[in-house]
Amino acid sequence: MALTQGAWSTTTVNGTNVMTCTVTTSATPENDSYTLKTPEALDGSRPWTLVANSAGATLDGSTLPVEIWLGTSSSAALSGDAGSVAGTDAYVFKDIIADVKASVGTCICDPNLNTADVANVHVKVPAAPYYILHLDGASTLPAEDCTWIIIQDAKGQNDGLVSSSIGGIGADPS
């Protein structure tokens, strides 16, 4: 398979982790596209927001759902195309966004969700060490970039802010 899978990068902005990954399909006929496993900075035991196809690129002429796979080890990976996508230490869970063929898709993935899933809005996804995001195409994908973004509060950031030093300038004068 000729996918170009960019590594995930993580930055922290205002106490929030922002993880991005770009996957480029080639001119070689491919029906599927998927990320590498998510970075260790993602805490699967807490809710996170997924933005799929963040640029709204035209990725397919047919419906293009986003499927999530659960990764169980640091070796978690997908390989293959069309009807032969397979996981190594990764197991398909379910579709979480119905269609991102030419638009941005978003979804909150919450392991603690106590209500029914609302596709494309809020879905229950079990806590896992890693996740792999998969565009499950029904037709040949064009040579395009699909950028994935995951947003999650950084663990421990701004939790119980009771420090006597604000901004490193000594005791809070208030």
Image: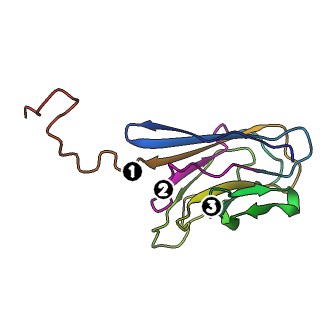
Question: Foreground residue, 71 or 32?
Answer: 71
Give the mark nearer the N terminus: 1 vs 3: 3
| Distance from the alpha carbon under mark 3 to that under mark 2 | 14 Å
Residue 16: which quarter of the image?
top left
Q: Which residue is mark 3?
A: 73
Residue 141 higher or lower than 84, as above or below: above
Asked if residue 11 can be seen in this view, the reply is: yes
- Residue 140 magenta-highlighted: no
Q: Which mark is residue 43?
A: 2
- Residue 52 magenta-highlighted: yes
Q: Amino acid at mark 2?
A: Asp
Q: Which residue is mark 1?
A: 155
Spot occupied by residue 52 in the image (x, y as percentages of width and height): 64, 47
Instruction: Name the residue at 55% across, 58% down.
Output: 121
Instruction: Name the residue at 55% across, 42% down.
Output: 19
Label 1 packing within 10 angstroms: few (<14), some (14-19), many (20+): some
72 left or right, relative to 42: right
Residue furthest top as drawn: 169
12 left or right, relative to 172: right
Instruction: Name the residue at 34% across, 45% down.
Output: 157
Q: How many marks?
A: 3
Nearest to the eye among marks 1 and 3: give it.
Answer: 3
Residue furthest left as drawn: 174
Give the mark nearer the N terminus: 3 vs 2: 2
Report helix, strand or loop for mark 1: loop
Instruction: Name the residue at 30% across, 45% down.
Output: 158
Spot occupied by residue 9 in the image (x, y as percentages of width and height): 58, 38
Q: Quadrant of the C terminus?
A: top left
Q: Amino acid at mark 3?
A: Ser
Q: Is disc 1 in contact with disc 2, using a CB cutoff of under 8 Å?
A: yes
